[in-house]
Image (tube, rainbow, N blue to C red):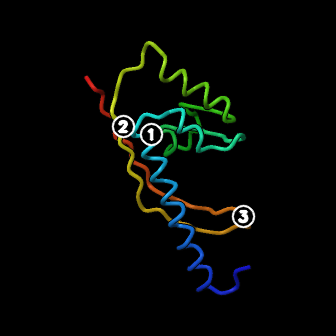
């Protein structure tokens, strides 16, 4: 158990490096359009919910994407890549300002800024 503020700060810094490495691998996977590989970053009981920024800022929880569990995420990933509406594109995901905020037993509360730039190949 961490007892000293200095110990907590040191542990949070060490975990931040692990989180950054995870985030970089995650971004590289998306940049490569490896949607099947992307799904593997989540646990079987994952809940993935995407809310448009304007909805989030207005306190409106209506989401663009809802996925409950890895199986549903795999289904959505397949649908994304195999729909007739799919157009080839380049993705670049930048992740910055990673912070480990708190250690709660075996969990780490963290935050980061995510910026996705999408360019259609056409």
Residue shown at 45% from the left, 53% from the top: 24
Tag 2's secondary structure? Answer: strand
Cα gap from disc 2 to disc 1, whole angstroms: 7 Å
N-terminal of the two: label 3 or label 1? 1
Q: Nearer the viewer, residue 64 or 93?
A: 93
**Quadrant showing the C terminus:** top left
Residue to which mark 1 is pinned: 30
Residue shown at 28% from the left, 26% from the top: 121
Tag 2 near tag 1, CB within 8 Å? yes
Tag 3 near tag 1, CB within 8 Å? no
Pointer 3 local density, CA inside 10 Å: few below 14, some 14–19, many at least 20:
few
What's the mark number on residue 64? none
Q: Nearer the viewer, residue 60 or 113?
A: 113
Q: Quadrant of residue 32?
A: top left
Tag 3 near tag 2, CB within 8 Å? no
Q: For this view, does 90 lie left or right of residue 59? A: left
Q: Is residue 85 above or below residue 63?
A: above
Which percent across, then down, holds residue 1? Answer: 74, 79
Cα gap from disc 3 to disc 1, whole angstroms: 27 Å
N-terminal of the two: label 2 or label 1? 1
Q: Is residue 111 above or below residue 5?
A: above
Cα gap from disc 3 to disc 2, whole angstroms: 33 Å
Tag 1's secondary structure? Answer: helix
Residue to which mark 2 is pinned: 91
Pointer 2 local density, CA inside 10 Å: few below 14, some 14–19, many at least 20:
some
N-terminal of the two: label 3 or label 2? 2
Which percent across, then down, holds residue 99? Answer: 50, 65
Residue to which mark 3 is pinned: 106
Which percent across, then down, holds residue 8? Answer: 62, 79
Which percent across, then down, holds residue 85? Answer: 42, 15
Residue shown at 52% from the left, 55% from the top: 22
Pointer 1 local density, CA inside 10 Å: few below 14, some 14–19, many at least 20:
some
């Amino acid at each position: 158990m961490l007892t000293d503020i200095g110990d907590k700060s040191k542990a949070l810094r060490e975990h931040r490096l692990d989180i950054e490495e995870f985030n970089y691998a995650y971004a590289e996977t998306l940049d490569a359009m490896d949607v099947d590989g992307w799904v593997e970053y989540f646990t079987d009981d994952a809940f993935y919910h995407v809310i448009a920024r304007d909805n989030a800022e207005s306190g409106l929880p209506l989401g663009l994407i809802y996925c409950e569990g890895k199986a549903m995420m795999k289904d959505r990933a397949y649908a994304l890549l195999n729909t007739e509406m799919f157009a080839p594109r380049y993705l670049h995901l930048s992740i910055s300002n990673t912070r480990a905020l708190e250690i709660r037993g075996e969990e780490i509360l963290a935050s980061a800024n995510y910026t996705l730039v999408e360019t259609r190949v056409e």
